[in-house]
Image (cartoon, grey):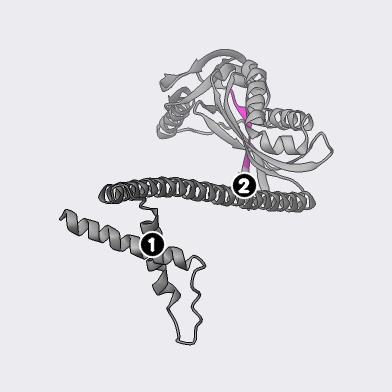
Amino acid sequence: MVMFPFFGFGTIIAGIILFFIIFLFKSVYMVRQAESIVVERLGKYDRVLRPGLHVIVPFLERPRSVLWTYVRDIDGRRHYRYSKSITRIDLRESVYDFPKQNVITKDNVTMEINALLYYQITDPKAAVYEVNNLSEAIEKLTQTTLRNIVGSMDLDESLVSRDLVNTKLQTILDEATDKWGVKVNRVELQEVNPPADIRQAMEKQMRAERDRRATILEAEGLKRSKILESEGVKESKVLRATGEAESRVIKARADAESRLKVAAAEAKAIEMIKNSVSGKDPLPYMVAMQYIKALPKMMEGKDDKMILVPYEASSLVGSLSSIKTIFNGLEVKK
């Protein structure tokens, strides 16, 4: 005899409630803002659930799960990578911090480059069905593109052309990921580290270049100082010579005017003497006056000096008699 277990009424009710809870859990989905869920019906794409409350048919419809890779920075040098299956696709702009990778330049120098990628999913359907593991695909594409770009540059060019590398990388990635439903907004090179010996050589070169510039600036400053000093001396001499020339001209003019005035006064005095002595020659008078003016200077000094009497002593006596006659004539006129 086959015995069937006996299920009570309470057990049946509990089973119905459990089935209803599972049905609600499998059929009701609350999609938050900036999220989306791709729903498949019998394994085929059906629709995309946008933010809001949605109900699907359990066992016939189900959310499509995708594999997503995450990278976590441990200590700046090591990165922890793990993957998990997700059903909710984040539509916000995301940043992907790539681990450091070795890149060889055109002149065979190996550098470590760390890049940051800012991207946003614009088409959830394409992100799910056009590529497997979107985040890992973007990472590998970025690494290979970065190697190609930096590999076409020299070391010096790659170090000073970060903006150019960022622009090229962003343009290439945006075009390549467009079919994946991804918009690459920005790419930044976070770190560019040449080898230690290259860095030391660059530091020495930079220090030598700065010393050279300092020496050149110092020499140019000294040269400029000498030029300014010589120009100052030159202008000073020119001004001094100009002043002396003007002073000599003024002095010459003053001497000329003084001589003219003295000559005019002497001419007037001779004219007056001539008028005072009518019919007489005033020359003896003038000679006698010069002798009289010169005698005190000749007699200056000690008593043992010898005094020389002019050869024309008779002329001096005659001049003195002429002076007497002139004074007599002046008294008669008075």
Outermost residue to the right: 108
Number of callouts: 2
Residue occupying image coordinates x 37% and y 45%:
260
Residue 17 at least partly seen: yes
| Residue 68 is inside the magenta segment | yes
- Crowd tier of the residue under label 1, counting other residues whose Cα lies within 10 Å: few below 14, some 14–19, many 20 or above: many
**Residue situated in front as seen by the camera: 267 or 244:** 267
Q: Which residues are magenta?
A: 64-71
Answer left or right for 72 relative to 37. right
Q: Which residue is mark 2?
A: 73
Image: 198 above or below 190? below
Image: 91 above or below 155? above
Where residue 123 appears, x then y in whole percent? 55, 17
Where residue 171 appears, x then y in whole percent? 64, 21
- Crowd tier of the residue under label 2, counting other residues whose Cα lies within 10 Å: few below 14, some 14–19, many 20 or above: few
| Residue 65 is inside the magenta segment | yes
Q: Amino acid at mark 1?
A: Ser
**Residue situated in front as seen by the camera: 277 or 175:** 277
In front: mark 2 or mark 1? 1
Q: Which residue is mark 1?
A: 319
Answer left or right for 254 relative to 91. left
Image: 28 above or below 284? above
Q: Amino acid at mark 2?
A: Asp
Where residue 305 appears, x then y in whole percent? 50, 83
**Residue situated in front as seen by the camera: 325 or 25:** 325
- Element on which disc 2 rests: strand
Give residue 5's mark: none
- Element on which disc 1 rests: helix
Answer left or right for 275 relative to 68. left
Q: CA distance from mark 2 to mark 1?
A: 130 Å
Where residue 49 appears, x then y in whole percent? 48, 19
The quarter of the rendered structure image containing the C terminus is bottom left
